[in-house]
Amino acid sequence: MVGKGIYLEIIGDMLQEIEKTQADNIEKASKLIYESINNGGVLHTYSTGHSHMIMEEMFYRTGGLVPVNPIFDSNTMLHQGVLKSTELERLSGYAKVVLNNADIRKDENILICSNSGINAVPIEAAIIAKEMGLNVIAITSASVSEKAKSRHSSGLKLKDLADIVIDNCIKDSDAAIKIEQTNQLVAPVSTIVGSYIVNRIVIDVVNEFLKNNTIPPVFMTANVEGGYEFNEKLISQYKERIKSF
């Protein structure tokens, strides 16, 4: 039988390790994001496969930042066919098609999540973003990436291209618990730790606004008095930049 309590222990240990080893990089990323937003920019996010859930975690959430532009591409998400999604995220040239349709501007930031960091699309997205003058912030597993072979013609990996790399501290596999009877692995962890990291980024960005005596652009719940109006004003401010509003 698979021990249920060990999953909680694994997740807890990973979050502690992230705080211990990645807090500085989270803070650096947050300062870049704050500076861009404070100057009228937005934070772009782009990921493929299951990693798109981490991108979605940042978008249009109570307590989340308003100026977040998720670059949604249905073809590399799961709901229109997982086999197609897997094939496309390994296809050289596809990232250019996606990013060419996004309103991304020099000196803004893009957050790219990929546990392995070896597939062509997230790698090329980082290359294109840097060519356009954006800062690339990556959430990836340094350990998994180091052991794997790049699927991009350059031989580079996402961690090689990012201006700031936030290690999700996954060591060997996204699935964390081994079934001794079959040698299979169960209980993935990348979505949980990735969501923790992006919300830690949000907290640090908010703190930068507060340090400067500015109201942070954070969604309020629409279920409190004035919440809907507060959100509408912010959405109106960023509607031209964020396609998914």
Image (cartoon, rainbow, N blue to C red):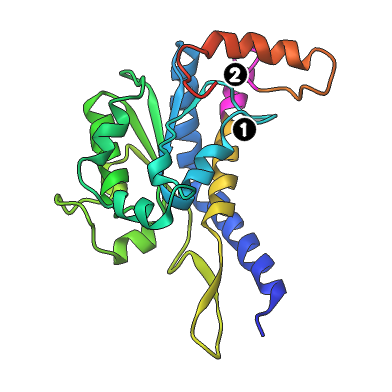
Residue at 66% across, 73% down = 6
Q: Is residue 158 left or right of residue 70?
A: left
Nearer to us in this view, 121 or 201? 121
Nearer to us in this view, 184 or 78? 78
Residue 205 screen position, x and y as percent:
56, 27
Residue at 32% across, 44% down = 122
Numbered mark located on residue 209 in the image: 2
The C terminus, quarter of image = top right
**Quadrant of the rendered image containing residue 94:** top left
Cα distance between the residues tagged 2 and 1: 10 Å
Q: Is residue 77 left or right of residue 130?
A: right
Residue 215 screen position, x and y as percent:
66, 13
Numbered mark located on residue 125 in the image: none
What residue occupies the far right of the structure in this picture? Answer: 225
Q: Is residue 82 visible?
A: yes
Q: Is residue 64 left or right of residue 174?
A: right
Secondary structure of the residue carrying numbered label 2: helix
Identify which amino acid the numbered label 1 is placed on: Ile
Residue 154 screen position, x and y as percent:
14, 49
Nearer to us in this view, 135 or 24? 135
What residue occupies the far bottom of the structure in this picture? Answer: 181
Q: Does the residue at mark 2 contact the one at mark 1 (Cβ under 8 Å)?
A: no
Question: Is residue 128 inside the magenta stretch?
Answer: no
**Range of residues picked out in magenta:** 205-218
Which sits earlier in the primary sequence, circle 2 or circle 1? 1
Q: Is residue 23 visible?
A: no
Residue 39, compared with residue 1, is above or below; it is: above
Which residue in the structure is indicated by mark 1?
A: 203
Question: Is residue 208 inside the magenta stretch?
Answer: yes
Residue 212 screen position, x and y as percent:
59, 14
